[in-house]
Image: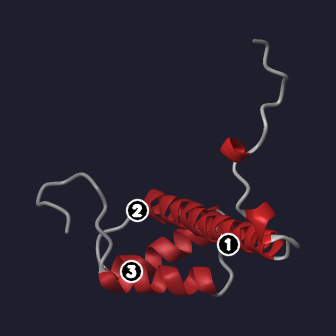
Amino acid sequence: MCPAGSSRWCPTPEQVMILEEMYRSGVKTPNATQIQQITSHLSFYGKIEGKNVFYWFQNHKARERQKLRRKLTKQLQLQQQQLFHHYFDSLPSPAFQHHSYYNSPPPFPQVT
Protein backbone atom coordinates (compact mmCIF):
# COMPACT_ATOMS: atom_id res chain seq x y z
CA MET A 1 0.00 0.00 0.00
CA CYS A 2 2.65 2.52 1.01
CA PRO A 3 5.44 3.15 -1.47
CA ALA A 4 8.98 2.14 -0.52
CA GLY A 5 10.87 4.95 1.13
CA SER A 6 7.67 6.69 2.18
CA SER A 7 7.75 8.69 5.39
CA ARG A 8 4.16 7.71 6.17
CA TRP A 9 3.33 4.97 8.61
CA CYS A 10 1.86 1.89 6.95
CA PRO A 11 0.13 -0.25 9.55
CA THR A 12 0.27 -3.99 9.10
CA PRO A 13 -3.04 -5.87 8.95
CA GLU A 14 -2.32 -7.22 12.46
CA GLN A 15 -1.77 -3.71 13.82
CA VAL A 16 -5.03 -2.46 12.28
CA MET A 17 -6.93 -5.47 13.60
CA ILE A 18 -5.62 -4.91 17.15
CA LEU A 19 -6.28 -1.15 17.04
CA GLU A 20 -9.84 -1.69 15.77
CA GLU A 21 -10.51 -4.29 18.45
CA MET A 22 -9.25 -1.90 21.14
CA TYR A 23 -11.47 0.86 19.76
CA ARG A 24 -14.53 -1.44 19.73
CA SER A 25 -13.79 -2.50 23.30
CA GLY A 26 -13.98 1.11 24.49
CA VAL A 27 -10.53 2.64 24.10
CA LYS A 28 -11.39 5.88 22.26
CA THR A 29 -8.82 8.38 23.54
CA PRO A 30 -5.82 6.61 25.11
CA ASN A 31 -3.67 8.59 27.53
CA ALA A 32 0.12 8.87 27.20
CA THR A 33 0.80 5.71 29.24
CA GLN A 34 -1.72 3.70 27.24
CA ILE A 35 -0.23 4.98 23.97
CA GLN A 36 3.23 3.77 25.08
CA GLN A 37 1.85 0.36 26.02
CA ILE A 38 -0.09 0.02 22.77
CA THR A 39 2.94 1.12 20.74
CA SER A 40 5.15 -1.37 22.50
CA HIS A 41 2.66 -4.18 21.87
CA LEU A 42 2.14 -3.25 18.21
CA SER A 43 5.87 -2.91 17.50
CA PHE A 44 6.00 -6.71 17.55
CA TYR A 45 4.01 -6.64 14.27
CA GLY A 46 5.94 -3.88 12.49
CA LYS A 47 7.45 -0.42 12.70
CA ILE A 48 5.32 2.02 14.72
CA GLU A 49 5.69 5.14 16.86
CA GLY A 50 3.56 6.60 19.61
CA LYS A 51 2.37 9.42 17.37
CA ASN A 52 1.02 6.80 14.93
CA VAL A 53 -1.13 5.32 17.68
CA PHE A 54 -2.25 8.75 18.86
CA TYR A 55 -3.26 9.89 15.36
CA TRP A 56 -4.86 6.54 14.49
CA PHE A 57 -7.30 6.87 17.39
CA GLN A 58 -7.93 10.55 16.64
CA ASN A 59 -8.64 9.85 12.95
CA HIS A 60 -10.69 6.74 13.63
CA LYS A 61 -12.92 8.64 16.05
CA ALA A 62 -13.38 11.46 13.52
CA ARG A 63 -14.29 9.00 10.75
CA GLU A 64 -16.81 7.27 13.01
CA ARG A 65 -18.45 10.63 13.76
CA GLN A 66 -18.56 11.44 10.02
CA LYS A 67 -20.19 8.09 9.25
CA LEU A 68 -22.75 8.63 12.00
CA ARG A 69 -23.53 12.16 10.75
CA ARG A 70 -24.01 10.88 7.19
CA LYS A 71 -26.29 8.09 8.43
CA LEU A 72 -28.36 10.45 10.57
CA THR A 73 -28.63 12.95 7.70
CA LYS A 74 -29.88 10.20 5.38
CA GLN A 75 -32.42 9.08 7.99
CA LEU A 76 -33.64 12.65 8.47
CA GLN A 77 -34.01 13.16 4.71
CA LEU A 78 -35.96 9.91 4.42
CA GLN A 79 -38.27 10.93 7.29
CA GLN A 80 -38.85 14.33 5.68
CA GLN A 81 -39.70 12.68 2.35
CA GLN A 82 -42.11 10.31 4.07
CA LEU A 83 -43.79 13.17 5.93
CA PHE A 84 -44.04 15.18 2.72
CA HIS A 85 -45.64 12.30 0.84
CA HIS A 86 -47.91 11.45 3.76
CA TYR A 87 -49.10 15.05 3.94
CA PHE A 88 -49.87 15.35 0.22
CA ASP A 89 -51.35 11.88 -0.01
CA SER A 90 -53.78 12.77 2.78
CA LEU A 91 -55.11 15.96 1.19
CA PRO A 92 -58.86 15.74 0.56
CA SER A 93 -59.08 16.81 -3.05
CA PRO A 94 -57.08 15.39 -5.94
CA ALA A 95 -57.76 18.68 -7.74
CA PHE A 96 -55.87 20.49 -5.00
CA GLN A 97 -52.92 18.13 -5.33
CA HIS A 98 -52.60 18.89 -9.02
CA HIS A 99 -53.43 22.56 -8.74
CA SER A 100 -51.22 24.61 -10.98
CA TYR A 101 -50.19 28.21 -10.73
CA TYR A 102 -51.05 28.59 -14.39
CA ASN A 103 -54.66 27.45 -13.86
CA SER A 104 -55.33 30.00 -11.14
CA PRO A 105 -56.66 33.50 -11.71
CA PRO A 106 -54.10 36.31 -11.69
CA PRO A 107 -53.30 37.50 -8.16
CA PHE A 108 -53.99 41.16 -9.05
CA PRO A 109 -56.68 42.65 -11.25
CA GLN A 110 -55.36 43.32 -14.71
CA VAL A 111 -55.43 46.89 -15.89
CA THR A 112 -56.43 47.21 -19.53
Q: Quadrant of residue 78?
A: bottom right
- The residue wearing badge 2 is 49
Residue name at image x 66 percent, y 64 percent: 73
Circle on res. 15: 3
Q: Position of residue 91 (x, y in %)?
A: 85, 71
Q: How many marks?
A: 3
Density class for disc 3 (Cα within 10 Å; few <14, some 14-19, many ≥20) is many
Q: Nearer the viewer, residue 51 or 64?
A: 64
Density class for disc 1 (Cα within 10 Å; few <14, some 14-19, many ≥20) is few
Residue name at image x 79 percent, y 75 percent: 86
Q: Mark 1, mark 3: which one is toward the viewer?
A: 1
Circle on res. 99: none
Side (left or right) of 108 relative to 28: right
- The residue wearing badge 1 is 78
Q: Quadrant of residue 67?
A: bottom right
- Residue type at mark 1 is Leu
Side (left or right) of 98 relative to 48: right
Q: Position of residue 33 (x, y in %)?
A: 63, 67
Side (left or right) of 84 relative to 70: right
Quadrant in which the N terminus appears: bottom left
- Residue type at mark 3 is Gln
Q: Position of residue 47 (x, y in %)?
A: 30, 69
Along the polypeptide, which appears first: circle 1 or circle 2?
2
Q: Label 1: state its secondary structure.
A: helix
Residue 53 seen:
yes
Q: Label 2: state its secondary structure.
A: loop
Q: Position of residue 57 (x, y in %)?
A: 55, 66
Residue name at image x 88 percent, y 73 percent: 92
Q: Label 3: state its secondary structure.
A: helix
Along the polypeptide, which appears first: circle 3 or circle 2?
3
